[in-house]
Amino acid sequence: MGKILWFTGYPCSGKTTLATMLKSHLENVRILDGDELRKTLSKDLGFSPEDRKKHNERVIKLLEEIKDQHDYILVCLVSPLRKVREEARRRLGKDFVEVFVSCPLAECIKRDVKGHYKKALNGEIQDFTGVHQPYEEPLFPEIIVYTAVERPEESVKKILEFLGR
């Protein structure tokens, strides 16, 4: 069974960027990106607290089914609720690695090329994390990267060092 690296942080904190960069340093890797999972696995769901819970449950079930097929699965999800991430840790076992992509909300808003924060602030999007819904930072993540002050290469190096690579 491979490692499951669960990248969590505000939207636009750099989760997918780091996972994509990390992939080139590892073998037999699959990336599960939150935006793509929303378009496929959970296209019928919105962003209410109940729908977020259902979405995360679906992701955890998918991971339980595919975890033996890859050396590394890089999961890029906002997953704003600590309780949900702890459930993933409990169910996925010892190979679950929480990667907290720490970035101040103001910096994430600046980086928002898709305009989601602007739409949320203008009331065009509801239940958006950081605007309408809280983000609960991890209490004891295995890895913390600080994407507002670290270059992406530095963050990737920290992750690779944790993995012994």
Image (tube, rainbow, N blue to C red):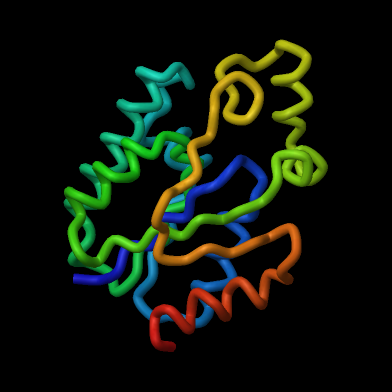
Position of the C terminus, as image quadrant, is: bottom left
What residue sits 65% from the left and 17% below the top? 125
Q: Where is residue 89 in the image (x, y as percent from the top left)?
A: 26, 52
Which residue is at a point 53% across and 40% down the rendered structure image? 35
Task: Give the residue at the far right of this rendering.
Answer: 110
Q: Quadrant of residue 2?
A: bottom left
Q: Which residue is drawn at 58% across and 64% down?
A: 145
Let me know if residue 113 appears in the view.
no
Q: Point out residue 29 in the picture as x, y percentages from the top left corner.
A: 38, 70
Task: State the image coordinates of residue 109 (x, y, percent, origin top left).
Answer: 76, 38
Number of labels in the image equals: 0
Residue found at x 62% / y 60%: 17
Pick out the residue farthest to the top. 123
Left or right of 60? Residue 44 is right
Q: Quadrant of residue 66?
A: bottom left
- Viewer-closest of 164 and 138: 138
